[in-house]
Amino acid sequence: MIASLTGTVTHVTLERAVLDVGGVGYLVHATPGTLAGLRVGERAQLHTTLVVREDSMTVFGFAEADEREVFETAQSVSGVGPRIALAMLAVLTPDALRRAVATEDLAALRRVPGVGPKSAQRLVLELSGKLGAPAAPGADEAAPAAPAGAGDPARDQVVEALVGLGWASKVAQDTVERVLADRSDDDGPVDVAATLRAALRSLGGRRG
C-alpha cells in the first residue's frame, strides 16, 4: 500500500500529475482541487491509495488524509468504483458529502457525474453511518479566505488555479467574477476551495 508520496512535481494535467520520488516518476490521479495546488518544479506531498486491478495499478492522490478516507469508503457502495469516488470529491468536500448522505440530499449527490437517481439513493443507503458525522455547516470549507474585491488574494488564487489547469486567463477571470457576483453579502469572506469548485462546475468541459 502506497500511503503517501513526497517528491517534485514534474507534470500536471486536468486529471493527473507526475511526482518524481527518488528518481521514479509516479503518475497520480487526483481531483481538480488537489491538482490546482501543485506547481511544476516544486515539492509536494500527497496522501495516496493504490487501486489494484487485474490489468492495472493506479495511484490516487489527495491533499488531505480525510479525502483519501472518504474516497476509500465510497467504493464500498455497489457500483461505485474509483472514478466515481474521485468525481464525488471533485464536486463535494468530504463534509459536504457527509451532510448530503446524512440529510438524504439526493440533488446534491446527483450533481456528481455518473450518479443518477438510483445511484444517489444507493449512496445514501449504503454510506449511512460509514462516513462519520459532518462538521457544523461551513466548517468543511475552511480554506484561506479574504474579502471579495479587486486585487483580492483569494480571487486571484482561484484564477491562478484555473489557469494552471488549462483555462485561458480571460476565461478564468470572467468565470470567477461571475461566481463571485452570485454570492450574497451575507456569505462572508471568499472561500478559495468553494469558489474553485463553483468555477469548475460553471466551466464544465469548456476551454478558453
Image: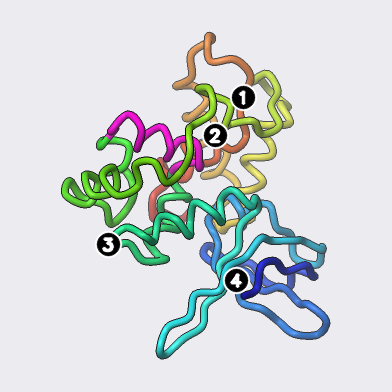
Q: Select label 4 or label 1 by which is in front.
A: 4
Specify the segment rendered in magenta. Answer: 92-105
Q: Earlier in the sequence, mark 1 or mark 3?
A: 3
Q: Earlier in the sequence, mark 2 or mark 4?
A: 4
Q: Position of residue 125 (x, y in %)?
A: 26, 45
Disc marking residue 195: 2
Q: Are marks 1 and 2 in contact (CB under 8 Å)?
A: yes
Q: Is residue 97 magenta?
A: yes
Vertical placement of residue 100 versus 36, above or below: above
Please give the residue where the numbered disc 3 appears in the rendered image: 78
Disc marking residue 28: 4
Query: Circle 1 sits in a helix, a strand or a loop, which is it?
Result: strand
Give the crowd class for mark 3: few <14, some 14-19, many >=20 residues within 10 Å.
few
Q: Is residue 81 magenta?
A: no
Q: Position of residue 45 (x, y in %)?
A: 75, 61
User: What type is the residue that disc 2 sits on?
Assistant: Thr
User: What type is the residue that disc 1 sits on?
Assistant: Val
Q: Select label 2 or label 3 by which is in front.
A: 3
Display colour scheme? rainbow
Q: Residue at x 52, y 25 (%)?
A: 180
Q: Select label 3 or label 4 by which is in front.
A: 3
Vertical placement of residue 4 versus 64, above or below: below
Q: Are marks 2 and 4 in contact (CB under 8 Å)?
A: no
Q: Nearer the viewer, residue 19 or 123?
A: 123
Please give the residue where the numbered disc 1 appears in the rendered image: 190
Q: Earlier in the sequence, mark 1 or mark 2?
A: 1
